[in-house]
Image (cartoon, grey):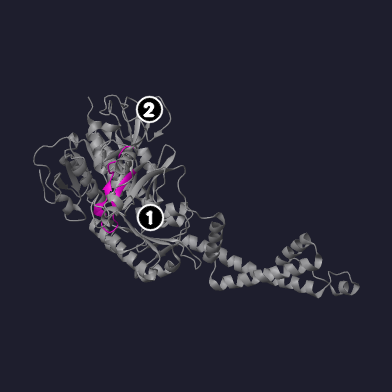
Amino acid sequence: MTSEGWGTPPVEPISQHYIVCGGNALAHRLILELVEHYEVPVVVLVADRSRDHAPQIEQLSGVAAVVEYSSITDEALRAVSIETARGLALVEGSDQENIHTALSAQGHNPDIRIVLRMFNQRLGENIERLLRNGAALSGSATAAPAFAAAALGRPNSVEVGGRFLHIAFDDAITSDRICIVADHIDRQDLSKIRLMPEQEGGSAEFVRLASEFGDDGPVRVGSGGGVGSGSGSAGGGVRHDVEPLPEAVAETGGVAALQALPIEPREPISWARRLRWRVLDTARFFTSARLRLVLLTAFALVLMSFAVLWYLSRDFGWTVYISLLDLAGAAQPDQPADIAAGTGTGGGWQRAAQVVITLCGITFAPVATAIVVEVLASGRRGLPRNPSAGTRDHVIVVGLGNVGTRVAAQLHELGVPVVCMERDPQARGIAAVRALGIPVVLGDGPFEEQLRRARLKHSRAVVAVSGDDATNLEAALEARHGNPEVRVVVRLFDDNFAGHFYATLDNAASRSVSYLAAPAFAAALMGREVRGTLSVLRHVLLIAELTVEDGSGLIGMNRHDLEDPGGVRVIAARVARSPHLQWNYADRTRRLGPGDRIVVAATRSGLARLNTVLADEG
């Protein structure tokens, strides 16, 4: 059942497997999630086995087969045994192609679980209604909040029950934390991080202190002798002073905790600052430097003349009235006969002020016309706007693919000034950011020149999110060279690459779109509801909400059964009879019943273990 140009379909009949269509980075991560954490058989359908991540995917031990078809046709779906598959993930191709494939797959196997990647989230919500058992997710929408938050130097958040969960590190951890989610954090060696460490009971610390201090205080060995040697105090007593712990014991690494905020954290930008930036940016965009000089000079002269008229007349209303008429060129001048008769407006200063206002009005009219013509002409040409000379404290987004477009839009929504850079003039994101009025620097020149045009010297952060690791790293290093204080956020797929990046650069962060999105896609493929992902440096935690249904393996389990160190922590529960979500649900022995809902923070392997429990229906 092979043909020239095709891959080799499974030699033996296969069933109860999962199909992943795509050979990109997201497909690679998703397959790793499925074979390593969920331990399910996976068949991969790719367009070319020699391109993108297909060669690495073929080397994964848990992959049952890699099948090559140039397009996903009915024949291709039959080749990967679509009729007996449990799930199908479409993570490559356009929205239209994925919709067509999903509907075709549902025709072959009405009960199959389908998860498709879609950029248009609104369209995805409508498509979900057409699928009997499907979900539409956006990898860029899942990952974009983490990039935007990293650019602003704050953690991203996930909304659950009216609260916004986020990860806090070290000194930022407050007393009302929900749970510790990571320890042994060493930013020079991210492999030391322990996710979901064992959490002792609330009384454990008191028991430890009581055991150590006892009735007489802490016991420490005195200098120069052992306990009771007499060298520590008179009469052979022991020392009661507390000595510092050895450095190896005291230094255990950083800590991260899960916390909840009543409202989503927003960038603290005052309305006055936003208005000032908008006005200045708009003025500088619509006018050139020379034109602005003419306008500012004319405006200053009008204000001075207005002040003279007001001083002479002592009537503010009349001054406004006559000034507007003079600007429009409709003022009634004094006649010589009126001046001789003493019935004119009188005063050389007043007449001079009116002349100045009239001349300035003559200047404003053609300048305003030129501005309107230029704006309309630029709109007809469809040209993206360039950053103005007054752009300050902005974020530069490098790359206007799906992720870059989402990041730029999210920062813009927060009120943060944004400038985008893109080398491909046909990139789909250019039109999207142009509709938001975001400046775009286009061109294929050196990054040094492009960043200079994007006003790197005055920027607060650079977010490099193109599809190529080397390009992103080049942009980051060039940005740091041009502005040593700028914060750098880089999209990297390779973990080793990211580890060196963290160890080398300060005030920098790296994120992987596929690493952030793949756990959510895998959980959705298994039918689990993942509310969002939270970043712990290069690691990922998932926030999932699970419903206890009749026949589910969760029935009869309690918190002791559900939680495990390094995997799952129950952070909230909603009893079937109660409409309210209870955070840090205290009753660890109450057994779950139908209708109960629990919210968990879990690692990828921890959520996979819960999936096996939920699949145990009887």
499 or 448: nearer the viewer: 499
| Magenta residues, start to end | 180-201
Q: Nearer the viewer, residue 369 or 141?
A: 141
Q: Secondary structure at mark 2?
A: loop
Dot 1 amino acid type: Ala
Could you tell me if the residues under marks 2 and 1 are in contact, i.e. CB atoms within 8 Å?
no
Residue 343 is left or right of residue 110, and the answer is right
Q: Name which residue type carries label 2.
A: Val
Q: Is residue 286 left or right of residue 441?
A: right
In x, y percent, where is residue 148? Answer: 40, 54
How many labels, in total? Answer: 2
Residue 226, image x and y in percent?
A: 23, 52
Q: Name the residue located 33 percent from the left edge and 41 percent from the top edge.
A: 215
Question: Which quadrant, please, contains the N terminus?
Answer: top left
How much space separates mark 2 and mark 1, taking CA atoms? 36 Å
- Residue 596 percent across, percent down from the top left: 35, 28
**x, y percentage for residue 104?**
25, 38
State the residue position of label 2. Answer: 575
Image mark for residue 150: 1
